[in-house]
Image (cartoon, helix red, strand yellow):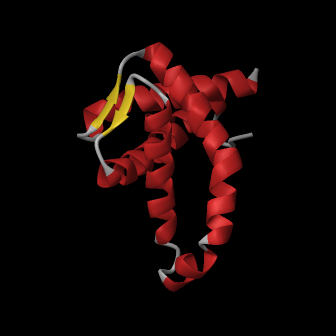
Amino acid sequence: MRLLLLWLVNALALLALPYLVPGIQVAGFGTALWAAAVLGLINAVIRPVLVLLTLPITLLTLGLFILAINGLMFLLAAQLLQGFAVAGFWSGVLGSLAYSVISWLLSRIVFGVAGR
């Protein structure tokens, strides 16, 4: 049940992005659900490999390269899904930052302050 609620929270966070970040479009709630699922899979499978492969660059930039990786993951999800569009790299970076913050805030509201 918690996983389904988290999926719904992430989809709602994606629906808020077009209002906050220019260059991001989400066609509707169904698209947001699919995008949340695809982003979850990408972040679970591809992102750890990229983080490991780019570890020297990440260390040299004091961790800022992770923002680039997050933006690229957003762009990849947009390429895989119709109805979810990201205009470019910087829109992807800003979108991933906003998505993380909104998702975190909504999770805190839904699951409580303890974040169990």
Left or right of 20 on screen, residue 114: right
Counting every numbered tag in the picture gives 0
Name which quarter of the figure residue 33 lies in. top right
Q: Is residue 81 left or right of residue 22?
A: right
* Residue at x 63% of width, y 65% of height: 51
Of residues 86 and 22, the one nearer the viewer is: 86
> Image height check: is 72 above or below 81?
below
Q: x%, y% of residue 76?
A: 49, 43
In the image, 29 versus 47, the foreground residue is 47
Residue extending farthest front: 79
Q: Is residue 89 left or right of residue 81?
A: left
Task: Please give the name of the residue rendered at 64% of the width and 34% of the height, measured from the top-left corner.
Answer: 112
Percent position of residue 78, x then y: 43, 36
Q: Quadrant of the N terminus?
A: top right
Check the image and report above or below for 98 versus 8.
Answer: below
In the foreground, 26 or 110: 26
Relative to 55, does residue 27 appear above or below in the rendering?
Answer: above
Q: Residue sitting at 65 percent across and 32 percent down?
A: 111
Residue ranking furthest to the left: 22
Residue, x 38% and y 54% (percent of image)? 93
Quarter containing the C terminus: top right
Q: Position of residue 110 (x, y in %)?
A: 60, 28
Residue 59 coordinates in the image, percent (x, y): 57, 82
Q: Is residue 21 left or right of residue 114?
A: left
